[in-house]
Image (spheres, rainbow, N blue to C red):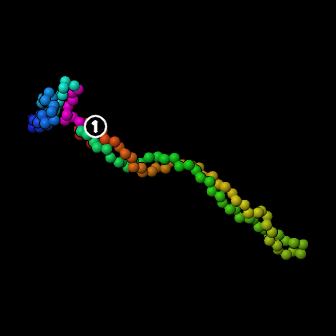
């Protein structure tokens, strides 16, 4: 940890931050303060780069309509001489079926932007 503090002092000196102050505070880590501004522990957070992740999402899939041909209906009838005759009872027609919508699980690639995270959480 003391080595990290000396490395931070060297880096801050190279960038021209002569007024930056680095102190070692035991188990808490390296404390960095620059120009009397905001303070934080440099070793308590890490940068997690942006990346694509594949996530499973529930997606609504709307229902659809389908046209189906219904066959004509025929039957046997007997004429006055007793002969069997095939006659059409109902004509064929197109029928429209409406299927209901439903939810579906789909894998989607989503961009997760970079962010700061507590050390040890990623």
Task: Choose top left, top right, bottom left or bottom right for residue 32.
Answer: top left
Task: Choose top left, top right, bottom left or bottom right for residue 34.
Answer: top left
Viewer-nearest residue: 64 or 81:
64
Does the stretch in magenta take in 50?
Answer: no
Name of the residue lying farthest toward the top: 36
Pointer 1 residue: 116
Q: Position of residue 87 (x, y in %)?
A: 80, 69
Q: Where is residue 13 in the image (x, y as percent from the top left)?
A: 12, 34
**Which residues make up the magenta segment?**
38-45
Task: Please state if 2 lies on the left or on the right of 68 as rendered.
Answer: left
Picture layout, residue 28 above or below residue 67: above
Does the stretch in magenta take in 44?
Answer: yes
Name of the residue lying farthest toward the right: 80
Identity of the residue drawn at 15% across and 29% down: 20
Instruction: State the quadrant of the C terminus.
Output: top left
Task: Please state if 79 lies on the left or on the right of 64 as rendered.
Answer: right
Mark 1: secondary structure: strand
Q: Where is residue 65 in the image (x, y as percent from the top left)?
A: 62, 54
Picture layout, residue 92 above or below residue 106: below
Instruction: Note whether residue 2 is visible.
Output: yes
Viewer-nearest residue: 97 or 53:
53
């Amino acid at each position: 940890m003391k080595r990290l503090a000396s490395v931070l002092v060297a880096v801050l000196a190279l960038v021209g931050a002569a007024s930056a102050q680095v102190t070692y505070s035991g188990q808490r880590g390296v404390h960095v303060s620059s120009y009397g501004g905001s303070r934080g522990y440099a070793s308590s957070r890490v940068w997690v780069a942006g990346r694509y992740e594949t996530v499973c999402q529930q997606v609504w899939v709307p229902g659809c309509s389908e046209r189906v041909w219904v066959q004509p209906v025929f039957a046997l009838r007997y004429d006055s001489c007793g002969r069997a005759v095939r006659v059409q009872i109902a004509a064929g027609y197109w029928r429209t079926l409406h299927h209901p919508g439903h939810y579906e699980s789909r894998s989607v690639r989503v961009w997760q932007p970079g962010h700061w995270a507590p050390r040890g959480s990623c």
